[in-house]
């Protein structure tokens, strides 16, 4: 690989997809300073801008933001400052800041635009080592991709071919200045410890260790693409966004079944559990009797078996238990991530006269009965939900509307025949978290019957 230079960078940028603006994630540090100056010198035809994410976590944050704005101004590069609040410190402040930064940058990208981040070969080596120490498989060892979808556009890492030392040599030759974040050298953080204590030892023995890690990550990425292609042949593509039949998994050798399950979960936007948990779950879920409802919960989501199929989605809170009073106006936010409920005018719906005394929203306790409008007889709500194909975890969270002590509507699906009138009000239940579960979106479609 040639030494770093703007022409060498240009060869990488020319291969990027889309035709929208190039955005540089500009922290003000050495790496992004090199990327900014080299790209500004190239003046790409598709346009160039820089964006700085302000977390407010360090006393120097305002000074860093001012430095970035001044640097871009001197180069004539449009600059944008994004202020974010770091919330939900799960995994530590470093991980929370990374999530907040990524979400803000993804939201800023327009269609066809590309975010350029300044990750280099040493960063890739750190990532490979971190994944190796966690016992990661091929997916983890593929580490950081040179190009990946992000928001409405893409994220590209055009500096992966060069080491930090090579970038620093160019920066010093150009007389550039940059800011230094002390957190990058704080050995309490795993990456900083590797950077400070291990990488210098490796470089002393194997000077091209970083470049070797980049090559290995690329080979793992190619192997991963083959595994994904195999998973698609085994059924991941056919069942994308739909329940995955247990029979499909049971017909495959365990390793291929786990590969299919991992790919299927990824297509749902879920980060799969570690390999050992996934393989153990596969055996338990597929081996359970048909009347059982086994499940697996992990940090990235939940996996449940029902009616000889696997369903997966984001983690759910326990179902609500306490009833809510509601006057039927506006939109009612339901507890425990159960979404929203509102009443809208309809050709046929709940008789407004029934609502004079207000509504009470409850959740199933068992024994409820209903004669849906247009049906001939009263039936147990349990039987109606089962026949409609509503999964148990959705049933437990479906709002039941009571007026004058009687059940008048269930979710957005049925109104009671005795409470129905022309020119009434129809309940609309919106539950994005539940709709994100495989195969559950039709339950929340306008006018949906609840049939999967």
Image (spheres, grey):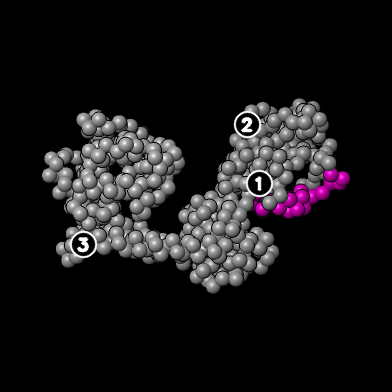
What residue is pinned by disc 1? 442
Q: Residue at x 86, y 46 (%)?
A: 377
Q: Are marks 1 and 2 in contact (CB under 8 Å)?
A: no
The answer to whether one can see residue 99 in this image is no
Instruction: State the extent of the magenta-drawn residues as a range.
Output: 375-394
Looking at marks 1 and 2 on the same chain, the residue that comes earlier in the sequence is marked by 2
What residue is pinned by disc 2? 331
What residue is pinned by disc 3? 208
Instruction: Place residue 212 in its image quadrant.
Output: bottom left
Q: Nearer the viewer, mark 1 or mark 2?
A: 1
Residue 270 is situated, as x and y percent measured from the top left of the image, at 50, 53
Q: Against 407, is 122 above or below?
A: below
Q: Nearer the viewer, mark 3 or mark 1?
A: 3
Q: Are marks 3 and 1 in contact (CB under 8 Å)?
A: no
Q: Is residue 384 magenta?
A: yes
Q: Is residue 89 magenta?
A: no
Residue 380 is situated, as x and y percent measured from the top left of the image, at 79, 50
Q: Are marks 2 and 3 in contact (CB under 8 Å)?
A: no
* CA–CA distance in space, label 2 to label 3: 60 Å
Looking at marks 3 and 1 on the same chain, the residue that comes earlier in the sequence is marked by 3
* CA–CA distance in space, label 3 to label 1: 53 Å
Q: Nearer the viewer, residue 228 or 289?
A: 228
Looking at marks 2 and 3 on the same chain, the residue that comes earlier in the sequence is marked by 3
For label 1, the crowd category at 10 Å Cα-Cα, with few meaning under 14, some 14 to 19 and many 20 or more, is: some
Q: Residue at x 66, y 53 (%)?
A: 392
């Amino acid at each position: 690989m040639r030494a770093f230079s703007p022409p060498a960078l240009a060869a990488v940028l020319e291969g990027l997809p889309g035709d929208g603006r190039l955005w540089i994630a500009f922290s003000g540090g050495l790496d992004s300073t090199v990327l900014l100056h080299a790209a500004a010198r190239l003046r790409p035809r598709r346009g160039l801008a820089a964006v700085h994410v302000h977390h407010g976590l360090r006393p120097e944050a305002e000074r860093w933001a001012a430095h970035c704005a001044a640097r871009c101004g001197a180069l004539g590069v449009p600059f944008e400052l994004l202020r974010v609040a770091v919330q939900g410190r799960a995994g530590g402040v470093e991980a929370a800041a990374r999530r907040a930064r990524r979400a803000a940058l993804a939201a800023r990208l327009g269609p066809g635009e590309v975010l350029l981040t300044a990750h280099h070969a040493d960063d890739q080596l750190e990532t490979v080592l971190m994944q190796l120490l966690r016992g990661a498989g091929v997916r983890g060892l593929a580490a950081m991709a040179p190009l990946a979808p992000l928001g409405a556009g893409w994220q590209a890492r055009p500096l992966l071919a060069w080491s930090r030392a090579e970038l620093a040599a160019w920066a010093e030759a150009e007389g550039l200045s940059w800011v230094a974040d002390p957190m990058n050298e704080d050995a309490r953080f795993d990456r900083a410890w590797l950077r400070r204590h291990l990488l210098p030892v490796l470089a002393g023995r194997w000077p091209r260790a970083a470049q070797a890690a980049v090559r290995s990550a690329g080979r793992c990425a190619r192997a991963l693409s083959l595994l994904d292609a195999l998973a698609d042949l085994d059924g991941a593509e056919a069942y994308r966004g739909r329940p995955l039949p247990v029979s499909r998994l049971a017909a495959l050798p365990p390793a291929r079944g786990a590969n299919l399950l991992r790919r299927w979960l990824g297509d749902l936007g879920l980060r799969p559990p570690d390999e050992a948990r996934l393989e153990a779950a596969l055996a338990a879920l597929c081996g359970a009797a048909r009347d059982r409802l086994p499940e697996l919960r992990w940090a990235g989501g939940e996996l449940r078996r029902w009616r000889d199929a696997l369903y997966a989605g984001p983690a759910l809170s326990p179902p609500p238990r306490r009833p809510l009073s509601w006057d039927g106006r506006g939109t009612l936010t339901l507890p425990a991530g159960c979404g929203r409920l509102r009443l809208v005018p309809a050709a046929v719906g709940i008789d407004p006269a029934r609502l004079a005394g207000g509504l009470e929203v409850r959740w199933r306790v068992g024994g409820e009965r209903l004669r849906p409008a247009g049906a001939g007889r009263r039936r147990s709500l349990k039987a109606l939900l089962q026949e409609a194909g509503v999964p148990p975890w959705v049933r437990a969270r479906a709002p039941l509307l009571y007026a004058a002590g009687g059940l008048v509507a269930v979710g957005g699906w049925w109104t009671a025949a005795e409470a129905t009138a022309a020119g009434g009000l129809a309940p609309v239940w919106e539950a994005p978290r539940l709709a994100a579960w495989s195969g559950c979106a039709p339950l929340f479609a306008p006018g949906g019957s609840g049939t999967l």
